[in-house]
Image (spheres, helix red, strand yellow):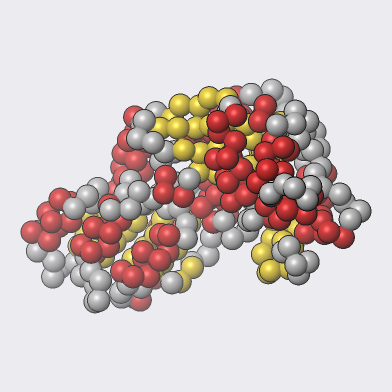
Amino acid sequence: MERKSSRGPGALSHILVVDDSSTFRLKLSKAVQHLGHEVTTAADGLGALRTLQGGTFDVVLLDIMMPEMDGFEVLAAMKADNRTKHTPVIVISGLSDTMSNVVRAMELGAEDFLPKSFGPSLLKARIAAAIDKSIRRRSQSEVRIRPANHSDILLLLVLVNTAGAGLPLEAWKRSRQATQSPWEKGTEIMQKPGEDISLANCFIGQTESGGLGGLGFFDSPRIGGDANSPDFDFLKPLQELERLAAGTTHISYLCTIDSWRGEGIGSALMRFAETCRGPRRMSIIVASSNNGARALYNRLGYSEAERRPMILANGRPNGEDWILMFKS
């Protein structure tokens, strides 16, 4: 996989370009970047599928004829996966491709096709149309949002732990009573009104097809853990960022069940939180490696403010960062 230079928070959309020709891949990437989009590239079908598992993309520009795994196989794999089945795909058609190949790709679920002899106006129109179709499709799959209740606690604890890169579970383990499991400690914390993951501040997003996600937010960050205890050193970078977010409506966690990402649940939950914030700024902390979440927050108008190194439960940094993002 090759990662092309990002345009940062101002990028319109995130586009994956897949083509085995390095010359054409570079040409198409530059053209897409010139339109204001962020670009990631893959040189073959297997690389494309690996990249799709690691991030969220608004459109895939996919070559049909590639060695080992061609565009048809990539399309079929994408449409069989809940995480990628709704991602719009525009197939790239060369002179050697027959119209029957283009038709076959469309039958497999491609949104459109783009000739390799494309001009900038055609490229812009094809991408815009694919994104518009995707937005309208997702808006038709309504996300229902409701306050969380006691029957949701286990689901929410799993989501909180996922969003926190496994550190919440470690914190519950270290603060529990001898007779408690870490999950029981998490349940106890969630049932307390003043905690940062209090059930009173949690909401569930759900689609008719069964997709689930959770969100917690409140008027100002609650600084959790014992900042003076070496047992909780791994929480200190998060605590520092939470202090910088004082006075904001802070999202303590946002997470969607892995197999239902890309269904618009996260976007719906974020917009719901924004309708409840009043005049305050919004804030959220995200792991630097979570490219899908960062792309979502960028699209919703959040921008990076501060970073702190992520520290593992063993007290050592892992090379990643926690990023504090704000939206005015």
- Relative to the observer, which residue lies in front, 219 or 114? 219
What is the tally of numbered marks visible in this picture?
0
| In-image side of 310 versus 257 (left or right) | right
Quadrant position of the C terminus in the picture? top right
Residue at 22% across / 54% down in the picture?
Answer: 113
Residue at 69% across / 35% down in the picture?
Answer: 190
Residue 310, percent from left and from top: 72, 61
- Relative to the observer, which residue lies in front, 226 or 11? 226
Compared with 313, 246 (above or below) is above
Residue 199, percent from left and from top: 66, 30
Residue at 62% across / 49% down in the picture?
Answer: 161
| In-image side of 128 versus 295 (left or right) | left
- Relative to the observer, which residue lies in front, 30 or 290? 290
Quadrant position of the N terminus in the picture? bottom left
Residue 293, percent from left and from top: 55, 49
Residue 10 in view of the camera: no
| In-image side of 236 versus 90 (left or right) | right
Residue extending farthest to the right is 228
Residue 203 in view of the camera: yes
| In-image side of 322 versus 28 (left or right) | right
Residue at 66% across / 64% down in the picture?
Answer: 320
Compared with 133, 8 (above or below) is below
Residue 107, percent from left and from top: 15, 50
